[in-house]
Amino acid sequence: MAVHFHAPPERPAEPARQGPDLPEQDILVDGTPITAREVAAEMQHHPADTAEAAWNAAAQALVIRRLLQDAAAARGLDPEDDGALDALLEAEITVPALDEAAARRWHAAHPERFGAPDLWEASHILIAADPEDEAERVAALARAEEILAQVQADPDSLPALARLHSACPSRDQGGHLGQVARGSTVPEFETVLASLSPGQVCPVVVKSRYGMHVVQLHAHAPATRTPYEAVADRVAADLRAQAWRAAVRQYIAVLAGRARIEGFDFAAADGPLVQ
């Protein structure tokens, strides 16, 4: 199984300073520098919610590459060749033999991977409300209850009312959400969908972090599970990949523990060690 890294970036010209302050010091791995400019260039490959998180992910990736390059060089391999890094990992990583009982347990615990989840076809009207604004939520609840009473009196009125009142983009489709798979929306919404019969309007307003919902279920396709025997090869591939990633993480942690890393707290870094 291959491990892929981005090619070491060229050192760009000093960029104009803008946005949040990020570390400017170089990182040293056993005396070999990874410059702040190199980390900045690597950040484009690690999108994150904040610039700091992207910087940390980029720095971690470059430190890992340096650790593997040094380990490859110690084996007499070309440290600049990604194929050599793959060869290093193949030589160093041992994945335990697959246990069928464990494979069957994995299959049973992950039905969503080896079958089809619950699917609901539904419509709703959303009256938006800030989850932190109690007065706004009280007002939204009162408004949603008024709309719910209209929909209960005439379920066919929901599309027109959605176009008039809903804060969800689905208002353009008359509130129709299409197919909603289990796990694709907030739990409180899914709980209500699972409790309704096709054609039924939920008798109460549904509260979520987004606001208040008037909900109607149109159809439900129950989840299906594929038998283990039909997907045994896929289960085995899942478990081998999982075991391989765990072994690589452990190997990299060992390399990091032996190395002297300055300018970056590798032990505190959060995120995937390999991709």
Image: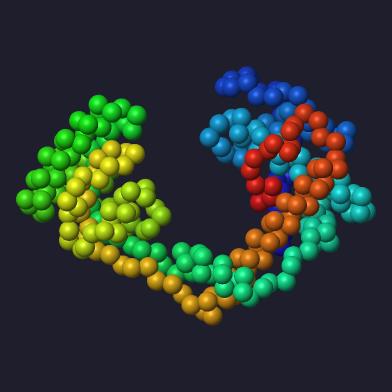
Residue 19 in the image: state x and y as whole percent: 57, 22
Up-down relation of residue 52 to residue 219 (above or below): above
Which sits in the foreground, 69 or 116?
116
Identified at 37% across, 50% down, the residue is: 187
Residue 65 in the image: state x and y as whole percent: 77, 45
- In the drawing, does residue 110 fall left or right of residue 93? left
Up-down relation of residue 19 to residue 50 (above or below): above
Identified at 37% across, 48% down, the residue is: 186
Q: Which residue is at the far top?
A: 17
Q: In this view of the protein, can residue 216 be seen by the observer?
A: yes
Up-down relation of residue 119 to residue 76 (above or below): below
- Image quarter (top left, top right, bottom left or bottom right) of the N terminus: bottom right
Total numbered badges shown on the rendered structure: 0
- In the drawing, does residue 213 fall left or right of residue 263? left
Q: In the picture, residue 208 is in which quadrant?
A: top left
Residue 47 in the image: state x and y as whole percent: 57, 39
Identified at 40% across, 71% down, the residue is: 224
Q: Which residue is at the far bottom?
A: 229
Q: In this view of the protein, can residue 173 be seen by the observer?
A: no
Residue 198 in the image: state x and y as whole percent: 21, 63
